[in-house]
Image (cartoon, helix red, strand yellow):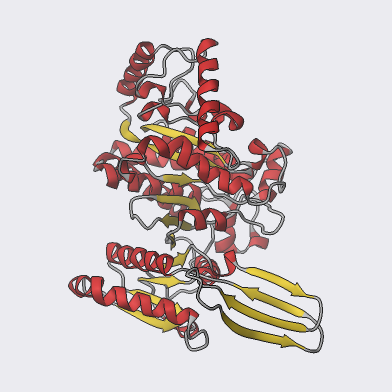
């Protein structure tokens, strides 16, 4: 299984066969994986496992795609692939992209994006990993966080192992539609996914001239950098049934005496308590990601905390950011004529509203969760927001739509009714992921294609062709009538037509 031939899609080799369940030891997992592959070969479902021709993906098992159909010998497959590519003049993307499939309406429009905007123009290897509860479990909300961990495990074991001794730009990047699960204790599995990968989530508005802004003064983007680790999202909370004392205890690993702090003594009945944490390493990763991103954008960077109240907790964030800035980034920022500044969160909110935009705002996890939605709405719509998780290595990213799975539209779709779902955030998940792939590979054609697709989306909206939610931003939802907006597929076709024209030019 050495080399790129071992990059498999989970949908092809089935969850119980190749994806590594958390409870299996590596040796047992390897044996099961090998046994299943031998069975497939014996059944003549796979004629050869050698070479890159065996890189497969369920989403690409179509005549126009680059995945190898199971019944084709490598030589036949290679010829068909070359013939089709020459006819279509598609851009070749040499290294793979990992696609994490999601649920409900975003799953539907995700497939439309691939069929209408990606596959006709790109010859790309996509390694498919489903995150859909319907695909993995058959029902929602059963295994709590188990599935989230198995998704990341599948990336590391099914996709990451062949490249363990190679660089991350060979592994590719993470391109995700959106991970949003209805768990028993939380509505989203995404915070757990981010906690495993680490890094910072950067959200940037997509500016369209025709969409009015609720904050008219925001003429430039405000980019929210959200620390994607710990705090409330990995906290332990509890309901206290009656009188008693809550203590915070730190037990050193070296065996020295524990450190105790009394939190509160409940005397008039019970209440609630919460304990949360973060790590120096994660805060340092957050700082580096934020400084690098602002430097790339050539925007000043602001970091906000409430260190006047949380002197130790938030003070640690402030101190680490300042230390790293002075040691590693001050000279670079001065050369770029930008700056870094720490502000109190309440002061920063007020300053943001008065500003014209044009800066990166580094927020702690909870602050970033809240402020990113406020900023998105201030620019017009949550459907016009990019979202990219930048991992600490700087080479691995996960691009997603900033919104959820659009359940209400999915219910309409199931009934056979037409929907008007805005796909722009999902399209930009593709473009931001592909732009990063282009940067890693030095692929100028791919970079140009990604930027052209983004511009095609914006120009389509500014030409007056848009979905219902965007029309509502202009006229108000109660004034929107049938005929004023395009349905999902019609809007996608309008973007595709615009893209085709731009690429010809």
Total marks in image: 0
Q: Is residue 265 above or below residue 502?
A: below
Q: Nearer the viewer, residue 413 or 462?
A: 413
Q: Quadrant of the C terminus?
A: top left
Q: Residue at x 33, y 29 (%)?
A: 90
Q: Is residue 148 above or below residue 88?
A: below
Residue 193 percent location from the top left of the image: 53, 53
| In the image: residue 281, left or right of residue 147 | left
Q: Nearer the viewer, residue 85 or 459?
A: 85
Residue 342 showing in the rendered view:
yes
Q: Residue at x 71, y 71 (%)?
A: 238
Q: Quadrant of the N terminus?
A: top left
Residue 141 percent location from the top left of the image: 71, 48
Residue 186 percent location from the top left of the image: 67, 59
| In the image: residue 493, left or right of residue 53 | right
Residue 472 percent location from the top left of the image: 59, 60
Give the quadrant of residue 239.
Answer: bottom right
Q: Residue at x 31, y 33 (%)?
A: 94
Q: Nearer the viewer, residue 36 or 140?
A: 36
Residue 487 showing in the rendered view:
no
Q: Residue at x 52, y 11 (%)?
A: 42
């Amino acid at each position: 299984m050495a080399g790129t031939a071992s990059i498999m899609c989970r949908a092809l080799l089935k969850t119980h066969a190749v994806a590594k369940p958390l409870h299996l030891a590596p040796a047992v997992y390897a044996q099961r994986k090998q046994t299943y592959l031998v069975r497939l070969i014996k059944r003549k479902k796979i004629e050869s496992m050698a070479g890159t021709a065996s890189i497969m993906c369920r989403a690409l098992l179509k005549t126009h795609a680059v995945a190898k159909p199971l019944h084709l010998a490598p030589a036949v497959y290679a010829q068909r692939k070359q013939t089709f590519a020459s006819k279509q003049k598609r851009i070749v993307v040499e290294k793979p992209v990992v696609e994490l499939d999601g649920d409900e309406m975003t799953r539907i429009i995700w497939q439309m994006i691939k069929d209408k905007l990606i596959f006709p123009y790109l010859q790309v290897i996509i390694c498919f990993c489903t995150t859909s509860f319907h695909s993995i479990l058959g029902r929602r909300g059963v295994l709590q966080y188990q599935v989230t961990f198995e998704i990341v495990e599948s990336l590391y074991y099914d996709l990451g192992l062949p490249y363990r001794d190679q660089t991350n730009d060979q592994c590719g990047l993470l391109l995700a539609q959106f991970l949003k699960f209805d768990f028993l204790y939380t509505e989203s599995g995404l915070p757990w996914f981010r906690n495993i990968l680490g890094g910072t989530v950067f959200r940037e508005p997509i500016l369209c001239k025709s969409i009015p802004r609720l904050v008219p003064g925001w003429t430039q983007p405000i980019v929210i950098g959200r620390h994607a680790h710990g705090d409330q999202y990995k906290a332990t909370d509890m309901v206290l049934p009656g009188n008693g004392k809550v203590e915070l205890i730190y037990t050193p690993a070296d065996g020295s005496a524990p450190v105790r702090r009394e939190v509160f003594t409940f005397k008039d009945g019970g209440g609630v308590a919460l304990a949360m944490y973060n790590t120096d390493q994660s805060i340092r990763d957050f700082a580096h990601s934020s400084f690098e991103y602002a430097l790339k954008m050539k925007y000043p960077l602001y970091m906000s905390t409430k260190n006047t109240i949380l002197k130790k907790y938030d003070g640690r964030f402030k101190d680490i950011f300042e230390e790293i800035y002075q040691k590693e980034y001050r000279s670079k920022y001065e050369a770029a004529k930008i700056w870094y500044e720490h502000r109190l969160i309440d002061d920063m909110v007020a300053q943001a509203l008065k500003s014209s935009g044009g800066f990166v705002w580094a927020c702690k996890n909870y602050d970033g969760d809240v402020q990113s939605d406020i900023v998105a709405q201030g620019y017009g719509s949550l459907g016009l927001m990019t979202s990219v998780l930048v991992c600490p290595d700087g080479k691995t990213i996960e691009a997603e739509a900033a919104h959820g799975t659009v359940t209400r539209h999915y219910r309409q779709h199931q009934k056979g009714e037409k929907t008007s779902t805005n796909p722009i955030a999902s399209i930009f998940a593709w473009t931001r992921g592909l732009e990063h792939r282009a940067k890693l590979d030095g692929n100028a054609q791919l970079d140009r294609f990604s930027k052209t697709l983004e511009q095609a989306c914006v120009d389509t909206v500014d030409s007056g062709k848009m979905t219902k939610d965007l029309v509502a931003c202009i006229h108000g939802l109660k004034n929107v009538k049938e005929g004023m907006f395009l349905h999902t597929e019609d809007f996608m076709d309008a973007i595709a037509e615009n893209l085709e024209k731009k690429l010809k030019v």
